[in-house]
Image (cartoon, grey):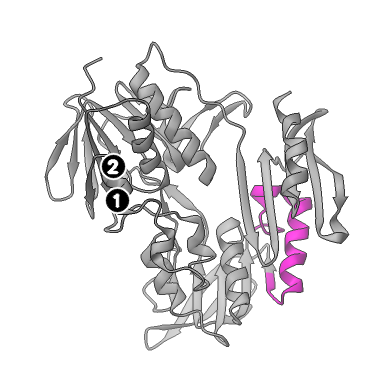
């Protein structure tokens, strides 16, 4: 392995900045370059669908580090630059303008790109939410009395629906699944999330597919569902999931699948590691490969990737975290440690769902594989340890 004189981190969000910070804290004193596609200083994404979208925060409040702290990291910031290619043999990354950056070590932290419908995105009023610019453009249209249709009821779509409803909009929430958050918390807890939205006045259209978006004079006016239901809308948000941002790696020889395919130590090729939403690696507790779209994983995996890059293949250690995710909707905080498989048996072990405060366990074959807290962060911690047994 060559000496690590220059480390390049591609992706300037939570995982990328954390990797850069971890490299310095672990003793790397060489040249460190952080490449980011957006022109903004690195910022946090979870507030985009909540505090920033609601107008409670301004963009500067989502910034992860002030510029003075970034300067202490001695970073070469290359913002507003998109990676266009990678040559792992020559150890170079090519930017869209043709410039090539050499490296001795590379951390890939390019995250995700939002999925889009095959139609309708040419209409004004149709949005996706991934970037700060997306959030600000959507916020301008979340006006009281406007009608909003949110397509997709995962964490992002459910949070956007809750935020829009809190701002006084008339909201419809559409999803292919039988409940919101079906993939994140399972069907039983998903029913409680559905009830939460209904009590706030959101209309749910579950097990429904969007067939068409129609408009007039270039503006969206209607969302047409596969059963013929027509939902009037001034604002449509498409939150149907994301895909790993790996297009720039297509001809690189880096193994790709659902993300960058890494080994257990987060290494994808000699001197190349991946972290965050884009990384796909074997996890022993999952019985196969995983890719975690969770803010906590972005931080933890970035630290692990940075340490393993500095340690080299002989000193690297496997990365096998207990997943942790959360969502804030209305006055409810839902947190989950571990896994929530759809076939798990769910039992409430603390509190009462009718009181809006409880802890539930997910069990498979008699083993606790996940624990969920509903407005119960302190009680939840008492049960997290059952996952490590």
Q: Position of residue 261 (x, y in %)?
A: 42, 30
Q: Which mark is residue 72?
A: 2
Q: Is residue 195 magenta?
A: yes
Of 367 and 227, the residue lying toward us: 367
Residue at the disc numbered 1:
68
Left or right: residue 210 compared with residue 280:
right
- Quarter of the picture holding the C terminus: top right
Q: Position of residue 355 (x, y in %)?
A: 86, 60
Q: Quadrant of residue 158?
A: bottom right
Left or right: residue 374 compared with residue 3:
right
The residues colored magenta run 176-204
Residue situated furthest top in the rendering = 314
Q: Are there few (<14), some (14-19), or many (20+) residues within 10 Å of tag 2?
A: few
Residue sitting at x 25%, y 28%: 29
Q: Which mark is residue 112?
A: none
Q: Is residue 278 magenta?
A: no
């Amino acid at each position: 392995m060559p000496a690590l004189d220059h480390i390049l981190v591609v992706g300037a969000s939570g995982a990328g900045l954390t990797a850069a910070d971890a490299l310095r804290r672990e003793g790397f004193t060489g040249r460190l370059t952080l490449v980011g596609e957006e022109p903004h200083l690195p910022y946090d994404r979870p507030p985009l669908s909540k505090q920033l979208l609601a107008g409670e925060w301004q963009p500067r409040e989502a910034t992860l580090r002030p510029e003075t702290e970034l300067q202490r990291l001695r970073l070469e910031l290359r913002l507003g630059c998109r990676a266009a290619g990678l040559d792992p043999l020559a150890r170079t990354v090519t930017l869209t303008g043709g410039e090539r950056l050499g490296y001795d070590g590379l951390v890939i932290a390019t995250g995700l790109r939002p999925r889009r419908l095959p139609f309708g995105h040419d209409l004004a009023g149709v949005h996706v939410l991934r970037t700060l610019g997306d959030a600000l453009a959507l916020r301008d249209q979340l006006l009281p009395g406007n009608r909003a249709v949110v397509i997709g009821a995962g964490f992002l779509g459910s949070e956007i629906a809750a935020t829009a409803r809190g701002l006084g909009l008339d909201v419809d929430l559409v999803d292919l699944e039988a409940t919101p958050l079906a993939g994140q918390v399972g069907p039983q807890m998903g029913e409680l999330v559905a009830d939460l939205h209904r009590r706030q006045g959101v209309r749910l259209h579950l097990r429904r597919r969007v067939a068409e978006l129609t408009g007039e004079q270039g503006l969206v006016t209607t969302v047409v569902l596969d059963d013929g239901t027509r939902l009037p809308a001034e604002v449509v948000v498409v939150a149907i999931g994301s895909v790993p941002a790996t297009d720039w790696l297509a001809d690189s020889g880096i193994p790709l699948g659902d993300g960058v395919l890494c080994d257990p130590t987060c290494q994808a090729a000699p001197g190349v590691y991946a972290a965050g939403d884009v990384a796909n690696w074997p996890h022993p507790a999952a019985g196969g490969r995983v890719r975690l779209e969770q803010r906590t994983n972005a931080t933890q995996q970035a630290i692990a990737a940075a340490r393993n890059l500095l340690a080299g293949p002989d000193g690297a250690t496997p990365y096998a975290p207990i997943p942790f995710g959360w969502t804030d909707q209305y006055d409810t905080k839902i947190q989950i440690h571990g896994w929530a498989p759809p076939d798990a048996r769910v039992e409430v072990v603390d509190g009462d769902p009718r009181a809006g405060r409880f802890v539930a366990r997910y069990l498979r074959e008699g083993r606790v594989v996940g624990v969920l807290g509903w407005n119960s962060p302190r009680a939840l911690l008492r049960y997290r340890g059952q996952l490590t047994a």
